[in-house]
Amino acid sequence: MSSRLKDVAARAGVSVRTVSNVVSGSASVAPETRQRVQEAIDELGYRPNLAARSLRAGRTGIIGLAIPELHSPYFGELAGLLVDEAQRRSWTVVIDQTRGDADAERRLLAQGGGRVVDGLIISPWALDPAELAATAPAVPLVLLGERGPQGAADRVAVDNVAAADEATTHLVGIGRRRIAAIGLQPQLRNGTARLRAEGYRRALDRAGLPHPSAAQRSVAALHRADGARAMAGLLDGPTEPDAVFAFSDELALGALHVAHERGLRVPEDIAIVGFDDIEDGRYSHPPLTTVSPDKPQIAERSLQCLADRVYSPGNAVPPQELVVPHRLVRRGTA
Amino acid sequence: MSSRLKDVAARAGVSVRTVSNVVSGSASVAPETRQRVQEAIDELGYRPNLAARSLRAGRTGIIGLAIPELHSPYFGELAGLLVDEAQRRSWTVVIDQTRGDADAERRLLAQGGGRVVDGLIISPWALDPAELAATAPAVPLVLLGERGPQGAADRVAVDNVAAADEATTHLVGIGRRRIAAIGLQPQLRNGTARLRAEGYRRALDRAGLPHPSAAQRSVAALHRADGARAMAGLLDGPTEPDAVFAFSDELALGALHVAHERGLRVPEDIAIVGFDDIEDGRYSHPPLTTVSPDKPQIAERSLQCLADRVYSPGNAVPPQELVVPHRLVRRGTA
DNA sequence: ATCGTTGAATGCAACGTTGCAATACCCGGC
DNA sequence: GCCGGGTATTGCAACGTTGCATTCAACGAT
């Protein structure tokens, strides 16, 4: 079934090398020879063996994308953009789901996804920023959505502190005074939730408003169910908030759901701001006000970083920290 | 940086072959030798080169997953399950997005994703069932969510006609009489929408209810925006429906959004049933009634099919048509 | 003491491709 | 007619791994 260069060469009556030249198009081949070879290729349905090519070239043309979970809208949208951008660069993307498992993340970093990949884009979840910085990655690495001590890898992220500050400040600006937060993750060493909490507190401090710990709800994961639970906890608490800043849109949608269940009007009784700008938020009732990171730019710049390291390992610039823009999108919930 | 079997062998003072035996664990190696080799492996940080292995074995351990778009919740959830199931089988998944492009689908079928993959799971979108059946795939193939003429590939799908019939019959059962449909795609040769439309009409025929073409809205894609447009068209039409069967949850959520905008009560004024059982539907307001295909089973059986063909090409059973179960999940919208 | 059997380790070759260097050829200029 | 310079084509080797066959040593059974 599968034919090799050798078969094509035999059929066209030329050497293996010449067929290779035709396929790659690099060396010069006489037009008539080229045509004869091309015909043989078509007749035999020849397709180059990528394993052999990779072995020869030392590169596979495959990059890894490691994310906590594919089914979450944010990561789904991001993965889609990354796959598109990779296709544009003739790269293939393999996907790993870490499911928030620290060991899985460690293994990926240390082994580079089993050597198949030329580079790895990873959105760390369970791992410590310090551990991330200390690990010597097996392949060129791009870290998504994290910030922390400078390590051996490039990082691409929004300015989480500033973004959370803006979101909270917006709630202050529309007259809210009891502003709660949903989405802290003290059990994780992960930096993102911490940074958003920091921005939240900073904004409230500047406005002279309190941020009691009872108004800052932790979550186990970032799903709608977690947001729903957290919202229920807030509403059952001593002081009912008049606004909530959720650290992700999924959390916000879960919270919105509970607000409806309890008969609260949104945004009149309680305002909600999310983070991520996922598609669902545009069609919720009411549509979700949210912080929108520039996802296409995250995808593009991550791959650009990786391309630089994989294709020009010579001029090794020091690890970069790329900050992509974000903006607050006002819709119906705040 | 990267060490080979040869380096490990030199360090441990054994032959390359022995190191290979230690790594693979297949042949018998003396305990002390094994330990010495293991130490050398650890010290050098040896990792086997997968390209070389693949070249030798004629297999890559990589399978392709080709779907229209990763960011859509249904495909995101399904892709997540497939990646998990593949990890369990020590396979790696590369993702291709066809973006509904017929040429992209054709290319994938004919070339098997460029020979890197051992097999391909594809959810066809733009391609004709007839063309699908006629194409000789480059690698073992599993088709998702389609049914049609028997071809060279296995198929895994729910019984779309029966499922659509059930959904529609449910709307009839709760007393609705002007039941519209959203999601026809006459411009595509794709079979799924056609099958669901067939089930919808069959149920209405059986109930003696009309299904005028004005009540059956076509869409360009299956996004919320398309559902919203279709719903607006229905509500602006001559007869306002008292129920809508949307061929996907995303369409249903877009429709729900417009119903809210127009001040309609759901389900009192208009009932809505979707299809896919995506996570968002559980948290919409009200939660979405939907047809739930058994997604874990789709993932598992697709990979099982592929495993059978890739690992036992000898006993080639004829192409199978696997029907996975579905059930109607009643929530708030109908 | 000898033979057969098993366990441990090894060498060779091959998977399909491409870089390198070499060869064969043709053409125009002296 | 010879030579230099380019074009077209080729053979060899190597990428890192594993299947196969082989070798060698040790041991128990005869």
Image (tube, coloured by chain):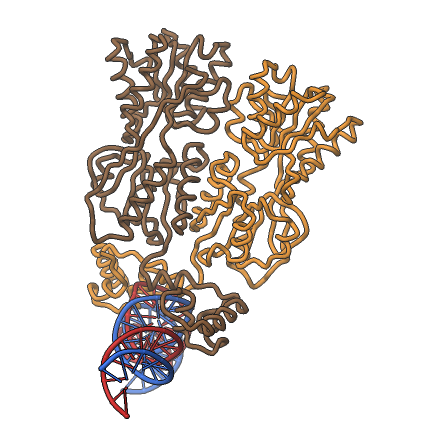
Chain colours: A orange, B brown, C red, D blue
Q: Position of residue D22 (x, y in %)?
A: 28, 81
Q: Is residue A304 visible?
A: no
Question: Which quadrant would residue B107 be assigned to in this image?
Answer: top left
Whether A78 is drawn above or below B177: the answer is below
**Camera-side residue: B89 or D15?**
B89
Residue B157 placement (x, y as % from top left): 30, 33
Does residue B144 lie above or below B316 as drawn?
Answer: above
Left or right: residue A61 versus residue A171 is: left
**Quadrant (top left/top right/bottom left/bottom right) for the C terminus of chain A:** top right
Q: Quadrant of residue B210?
A: top left
Camera-nearest residue between B107 and B132: B132
Dividing the picture into quarters, in which one does residue A214 lie? top right
Q: Position of residue B141 (x, y in %)?
A: 28, 45
Question: Residue at image x 34%, y 15%?
Answer: B170
The quarter of the image holding the N terminus of chain A is bottom left
Number of marks in picture: 0
**Residue at left offset 57%, top offset 37%:** A294
